[in-house]
Image: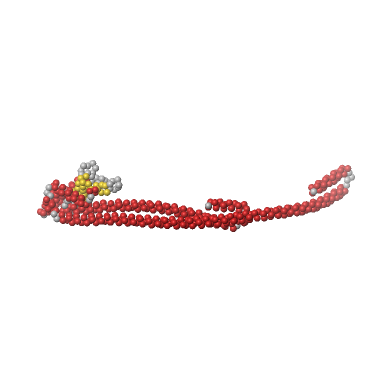
Amino acid sequence: MGGSSILIIILLIISILIQFIILSKLNKDSFDEKILRQYFDNVQSKIEAAFKDEIRRIREENYTISFQNRQEISQNILGMTDSINKQISSIGNLQKDQLEIVTGKLLELLKTNSEGLDKIRQAIEEKLKQIQDDNNKKLEDIRATVDEKLHTTLENRLGQSFKNISERLEALYKQLGEIQSLSLGVNDLRKALSNVKTRGVWGEIQLANIIEDLLTSEQYDMNVATKKGSNERVEFALKLPGKDDMQKYIYLPIDAKFPQEDYQRLLEAFDLGDKEAVEEARKLLEKRVKEEAKTIFEKYIDPPNTTDFAILFLPTESLFAEVVRNTGLIETLQRDYKVIITGPTTISALLNSLQMGFRTLAIEKRSSEVWRILGAVKTEFGKFSEILEKTQKKLLEASNSIESATKKTKTIERKLKDVQQLPQEESLKLMENVYDDVDETA
């Protein structure tokens, strides 16, 4: 509408200009400038008036059109609002009905879960109590059995060992008394033993009697070659326990020597009271003893097949006392030839000590058996402890499952408080998650 009015005004101006041009050509010479200016002023006034009228008319038309458009838009908005309100009300009613159905199902499900959890908890508590009672009973039985076996075994074996030791000590005391009685007739025996071979045999017999009285036949060998690659045989060799299981025993060589001539010469010098003869006889006796010790060292000592020392047995107490009187000689024999000098009394004490050592070793071996039994019991206890730990883990897993189900139930209850304020899509999504959690718990 406004565009057509403007077009008319423009055409009017153009027609006026065309007329003006035509008139100016026709009357160019006679055309008055004043009249022309007046004419243009009139035209301009008319154009301005026409413009103002047209603008006012356009404004009125625009106002009318705008008012009509506003009324039409308001009516459309009211219609849409009524339609939306009706749809929202319908959706709300539908959502309310669905939520009431879901709430009823959830309450029923919660009630069922609560009853099931109560039954599971009660069954687990009963099972736990039963397991604890069984475990306590088994532990008491095992403890009683172990105590009884340990007490009986240790009491019997230790009692028997102490009894044997007491008997051996009593026998030792008796033998010491007998040896003291026999020492009274040493001088007579010395005079009777004039033959060298007889003296040697007598020394071996005396040593054999002492060894046979104090040791068993399994604890020594007679006339045995103790050095590898040598045929020299020692009179007696005690069997001592080896360092490990691969070496069952090693030999302790014992050889009897009786340097009667040298000792007799010393006694005669004492009877005469000749100091020089006494010193000379002692030197000869020491030399003879060193030679015998060297022979024993070279022929019989062979570590590790034997001990690193040997024993030289002197069959009379008086001869033994004279030899050990010289402490320097004893140290030389032990240092250079690894030989220990013994007499009838000291060899008996030494053999009794070894016998006690054998019995102590036997007790230790028996004790190791007891320790092995205890080790087996400890192993069984370890297995039983592992079973208890596994049972405890299973019970903890069941307890954690119950606790997890309880937490999920409480979570559902908290979410149900605000369920009416959720949109329909979020509500449906939430319910799907709840059903998935319930299925996983079951």
Q: Where is residue 196 in the image (x, y as percent from the top left)?
A: 13, 47
Residue 215 placement, left or right of 276: right
Q: Position of residue 71 (x, y in %)?
A: 75, 54
Q: Residue furthest left?
A: 272
Q: Where is residue 364 in the image (x, y as percent from the top left)?
A: 29, 52
Instruction: Give the image quarter of residue 422.
Output: bottom right
Residue sitting at 54 percent across and 51 percent down?
A: 439
- The answer to whether residue 234 is seen in the rendering is no
Name the foreground residue: 118 vs 184: 118
Total numbered labels: 0
Residue sitting at 24 percent across and 42 percent down?
A: 228
Q: Position of residue 190 (x, y in %)?
A: 13, 51
Name the foreground residue: 25 vs 438: 438
- The answer to whether residue 353 is seen in the rendering is yes
Residue 432 placement, left or right of 162: right
Residue 187 placement, left or right of 23: left
